[in-house]
Amino acid sequence: MTLWIIGHLLAACIGVSLGLIGGGGSVLALPILVYVMGIPPKSAIAMTLVIVGTVSLLGVIPHWRAKNIDFNTAFIFGSATMLGAFVGAKIATLPVVTAAFQMMLFAVMMLVAAVFMIRRSSKPVTADDKLAFYPPPVCKYCWLWLISEGLGVGVLTGLVGVGGGFAIVPALVLLGNVPMKQAIGTSLLIIVFNSVAGFLGYLGHVSLNWNLMLSFIVAASVGTIFGAYLAEFVPANRLQKSFGYFLLAVAALVLVQNRQQPRSPQVENHSDSRLVTVSRPKTFAIPSLRDATRRVISKK
């Protein structure tokens, strides 16, 4: 019960970060589900897609009211990302793709997102500048690059459950020539598309805890409202930089926890006169972080 409370408090913190800095927090949903709630990684990735997609959908509403969504670009880019997300999810369900590999890839993506957030936070600019954080586009066939990046982002979404906002926003600004305000709202809508397609790719291949997903969504949504209120009093740039360093620490922890696969036990087969050893397929073992949390709680 205590771990359940801790997990949901952390889910609320995800929402607070989304409300404060507008993104990045959803990337923490997967490690919380795996290391705190004890959900197997593949199931946790599918559940993360539902959580991230729903919270992003809630974020779309104010942007839609403010007319900060470019639906044409969202359709073009979103079609590519949906295809990529579905393919990525199908690849993830193959036996050769281990849960440990997915967690390692997720940690790498988290490192990239953290570095991007830290670098962006050091460049204070106005949201009206459509090239605020990026140089002007130089490609001749930007639409082709836009679709290509959409496919790539979608595959990563399906594989590890990340929304990919840190890659979608610059693509929309540079390649889609979308103003920064519209790029943020449009990226949220695209993340919703990604999440739906990726989840459909996992559906039927993994077990899902629907009650936990619903309670996580509620906790994150409440946190988002509170974070949006705090954003009026807290400087976003400083928070974004601090959160970026926090993501670096979490990514390093995930990498350390998954640096070695557990040895697979040997099974002896005496049906023949010769001794035959059959190696069982490697499976992902939930790292000791959750057990350590239990021990700390039990001591108190």
Image (spheres, grey):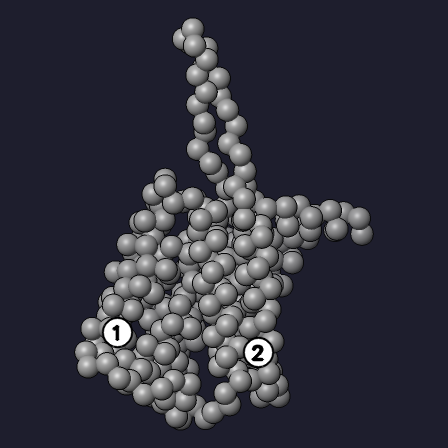
What residue is shown at x 65% (from left), y 52% (from top)? 3
Q: Describe the element under mark 2 as helix, strand or loop.
A: helix
Could one spot residue 24 in this view of the protein? no
- From the top left corner, tell me how far across and down residue 249 is, in percent: 60, 64
Mark before the other along the chain sequence, 2 or 1: 1
Foreground residue among 217 and 295: 295
**Amino acid type at image mark 2:** Lys
How many numbered discs, if any? Answer: 2
Q: CA distance from mark 2 to mark 1?
A: 28 Å
Residue underneath mark 2: 241
* Relative height, residue 192 to residue 229 (above, below): above
What residue is shown at x 55% (from left), y 55% (from top)? 254
Mark 2 nearby-residue class (10 Å; few <14, some 14–19, many ≥20): many
* Relative height, residue 243 to residue 110 (above, below): below
Q: Quadrant of residue 269?
A: top left
Q: Quadrant of residue 186?
A: bottom left
What residue is shown at x 44% (from left), y 49% (from top)? 101
- From the top left corner, tell me how far across and down residue 195 is, in percent: 36, 62
What residue is shown at x 19% (from left), y 78% (from top)? 141
**Amino acid type at image mark 1:** Leu
In the displayed structure image, the side of residue 220 where residue 65 appears, left or right: left
Residue underneath mark 1: 146
- From the top left corner, tell me how far across and down residue 168 is, in percent: 36, 73
